[in-house]
Amino acid sequence: MLSADLPRNAGAGGGTVAVQGVCFDANASFARGAAGGPVAIRQALFSGSANLCAENGFDLAAGGGVRFVEDDLRPAGADVMPAKVEGRVAELLARGVRVLCLGGDHSITHPILRAYAGRYPRISVLHLDAHPDLYDELDGNRFSHACPFARIMEEKLADRLVQVGIRTSNGHQREQARRFGVEVVPMADWHDRLFLRFQGPLYLSIDLDVLDPAFAPGVSHHEPGGASTRQLIGLLQRLEADVVGADIVECNPLRDVGGMTAMTGAKLVKEVAALMAAADDQRASRKYQSISAGPANT
Ligand SMILES: [Mn+2]
């Protein structure tokens, strides 16, 4: 049951963001614990140690822009998770809001995108992760958190898939990326003037392990050599896209150090919600600011 006071309809060009927790980690291949991610991220966000403003001034506390759905999804097992997640996200989308899901292991992105495909038949996906998550199967599980983007591309749920921050591709996953026409910016090619622009609606999927474990130790798979928190936020702030949906996944409080990954997740909730809620005029002004702030002597 949905208890958040969500609107029945939201206008085009930005709108209300519904934040939905998905407490689920049964499709994790290595370590459990990501089911605790949504609660840990919300506790960090509302701990009182920081205000609720994104860096562009968008204020989650201002009311109207962002609502936290009160009841987290807690699927009893991997067999019931896809229908529960797809059903809830479809229910939220039917109210005209944009959905930001907190995971949970990355397998939740597949049913989320099934719901999105029902409303956005042509949607691009930007996937930020150390891992391509393109395995045909892992340990006999085709719905492992290592496989969602193979299923998404097979079912043609995304028009375009762009992966950034990848640093673990093996031969099989490189072949899968070729087969599905995935556009990959490996971590080795990430630079601080990387501008990403998307036509049409965009879904943004952030696995916290895109960050270096020094910045986000509370993830199940430590993969050194990742992005800094500042690099990730910079990439998001330079993004030119209409972000209609997003997830922040794989926060594992059992592996966290002093709650710093949960706080990083909370920081990203603010930045991503600001992107999703931005009306067209706000996006235009953000673009103008980024141009005017450029080097004066070039
Ligand atoms: Mn990953």
Image: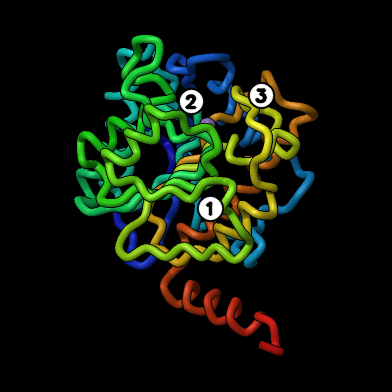
Residue 228 position within the rendered picture, expressed as x and y whole percent measured from the top left: 69, 47
For numbered disc 1, what is the local secondary structure? Answer: helix
Which mark is on residue 253? 3
Q: Quadrant of the C terminus?
A: bottom right
Q: Which amino acid lies under the numbered mark 1 shown in the image of this protein?
A: Val
For numbered disc 3, what is the local secondary structure? Answer: helix
State the residue position of label 1. Answer: 272
| Crowd class of label 1 (few under 14; some 14 to 19; many from 20; radius 10 Å) | many
Task: Using the numbered discs, state the Cα–Cα distance from disc 3 to disc 1 in whole angstroms.
Answer: 21 Å
Query: Image point 73% across, 39% down: which residue?
Result: 215
Q: Which amino acid lies under the numbered mark 2 shown in the image of this protein?
A: Asp
Query: Looking at the image, is mark 2 or mark 1 earlier in the sequence?
Result: 2
Q: Quadrant of the N terminus?
A: top left
Q: Nearer the viewer, residue 113 or 270?
A: 113
Tell me, yes or no, whether the two marked residues, 2 and 1, touch with CB atoms within 8 Å.
no
Q: Nearer the viewer, residue 283 or 177?
A: 177
Whether residue 129 is visible to the viewer of this picture, yes or no, is yes
State the residue position of label 2. Answer: 105
| Disc 1 Cβ-to-ligand 1 distance below 8 Å | no
User: In the picture provided, is 277 more to the left or to the right than 271?
Assistant: left
Residue 135 position within the rendered picture, expressed as x and y whole percent measured from the top left: 37, 25
For numbered disc 2, what is the local secondary structure? Answer: loop
Query: Looking at the image, is mark 2 or mark 3 earlier in the sequence?
Result: 2
